[in-house]
Amino acid sequence: MAEAIGVIKAKLQAAGIKELPALFSEYEQDGRAGVRAAVEQAKKRILAYEKEVARTETLWKYEREYAACAHICGIDEVGRGPLAGPVVAGAVILPKDCDILYINDSKKLSEKKREELYDVIMERAVAVGLGYSAPERIDEINILQATYEAMREAISQLAVEPDLLLNDAVTIPQVTIRQVPIVKGDAKSISIGAASIVAKVTRDRLMVRYDEIYPEYGFASNKGYGAQAHIDALKKYGPCPIHRRSFITHFC
């Protein structure tokens, strides 16, 4: 008696990428339309996986170029543009044999995918450092200098001292470690992409906690950025303690 189509579909959906070829051999001769469709869908999964492997391979360009360095650290920041909350910098050193897929500029990933990757990165990284610059510090020294401070703090928090820094676009002052700035580096370097994910998830979680303290502004959804509802709340309630006074002069 032929295996039920629903059972075959479930097997194909549950199988890992490496398990699928054996299942193809088993079911490709099944002439039922439902089975053929399920096999074709599974084949598309393999093609998508292979495409992602190839894309991730390109993200190792700079890490391979500087492979003589024992510990290469990617650095990125999140939160330069919001009206409220800190700027957060991430510094990540990945192992040279790292095979994490789907790392990218954090803005190009869904919240669910960022959260998944955050856990994987934190588990498998050689070292992770985080740096923060509070709203009042941003007002005091300006956002660029505050970003540099957060980046220096992130580097200082690493458990392993890096030999090389791969930075997203900037050269950080007052840092003696060799630096390589890469424009749009979070989409070109696996290390910078990992740093962008760690920084983004960290800051987003922080803004969700702030939303519990200052619920009027919708920080859980807008993360402090200038969404219309946030601006309307600013005009109605005025600023709260985590607003950047130098960023909101047009609104209140």
Image (tube, helix red, strand yellow):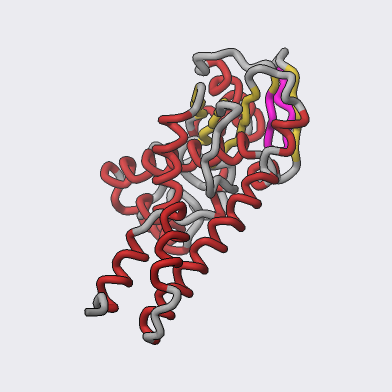
Q: How many marks?
A: 0
For the point 39% across and 67% down, which residue is it? Answer: 26
- Residue interval drawn in magenta: 165-174
Q: Is residue 166 magenta?
A: yes
Q: Is residue 135 magenta?
A: no
Instruction: Decide if residue 179 is on the left or right side of residue 148.
Output: right
Q: Position of residue 191 (x, y in %)?
A: 61, 34
Q: Position of residue 90 (x, y in %)?
A: 54, 31
Which of the 4 image quarters holds residue 72? top right
For the point 35% across and 55% down, which residue is it? Answer: 218
For the residue pair 75 and 37, the one nearer the viewer reads as: 37
Which of the 4 image quarters holds residue 186? top right
Looking at the image, the residue that sits furthest to the left is 1
**In the rendered image, the vertical position of residue 181 relative to residue 35, given as above or below:** above
Q: Main secondary structure of the magenta part?
A: loop
For the residue pair 84 and 234, the one nearer the viewer reads as: 84
For the residue pair 123 and 114, the one nearer the viewer reads as: 123
For the residue pair 15 and 108, the one nearer the viewer reads as: 15
For the point 57% across and 63% down, which residue is it? Answer: 47
For the point 62% across and 25% down, which residue is it? Answer: 73
Q: Position of residue 33 (x, y in %)?
A: 39, 86
> Does the image show residue 124?
yes
